[in-house]
Amino acid sequence: MKKIYHLANCTTCQRILTELKPGKDFILQDIKSEPITEQQLDAMQKLAGSYEALFSRVAMKYRSMGLNQIKLSEKDYKKYILEEYTFLKRPVIIIDKEIFIGNAPKTVVAAKAAMHKK
């Protein structure tokens, strides 16, 4: 499977998609208009190793909800990501059995290399 979970109105996601130039074999899912399902999140977690790895601590709601003041469990991370799309660290790029999470430059470079290797 080749899939990219992103937020269409996020300029960072737009910039990364422009840089990556995913082919027609990629499925793009805007997580705002088409929310991720529990099954999709579970599949991401299996590749990532934890829900925490998929959780964005830079989401505005992280502080406003006081989540930075409490210790979150794996169950909490999963719950919050499913309840609020902004808690998914974006973009999430899945290429077969590999997952690339977030917008760190080294992550984008690795995803680009994986996408375009023959």
Image (cartoon, grey):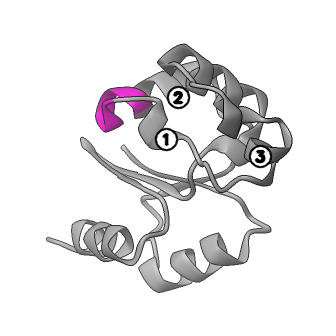
Q: Which mark is residue 41?
A: 2
Tell me the element at label 1. helix
Q: Which mark is residue 96?
A: none
> Residue 8 at what x, y percent from top left?
74, 64
Indicate whether residue 108 is drawn in magenta: no
On screen, residue 59 above or below 12: above
| Residue type, mark 1 in image | Leu
The CA span between labels 3 and 2 is 23 Å
Q: Quadrant of residue 36?
A: top right
User: The C terminus lies in which quarter of the figure?
Assistant: bottom left
| Residue type, mark 2 in image | Leu
- Name the residue furthest left: 118
Whichever of labels 2 and 1 marks the residue nearer the N terminus, that label is 2
Q: Which mark is residue 63?
A: 3
On screen, residue 112 above or below 97: below
- Name the residue furthest front: 69
Q: Quadrant of residue 78?
A: top right
* Residue displayed at 73% across by 41% down: 85
Q: Which residues are magenta?
A: 45-49
Q: Count neighbours of disc 1 (C-alpha within 10 A) and say few if under 14, some if 14 to 19, many if 20 or more.
A: many
* Residue displayed at 83% across by 36% down: 65
Let me know if residue 34 appears in the view.
no
Q: Is residue 111 left or right of residue 74?
A: left
| Residue type, mark 3 in image | Arg
Residue placed under numbered mark 1 in the picture? 54
| Contact between labelled residues 2 and 3, with CB atoms less than 8 Å apart | no
The CA span between labels 2 and 1 is 9 Å
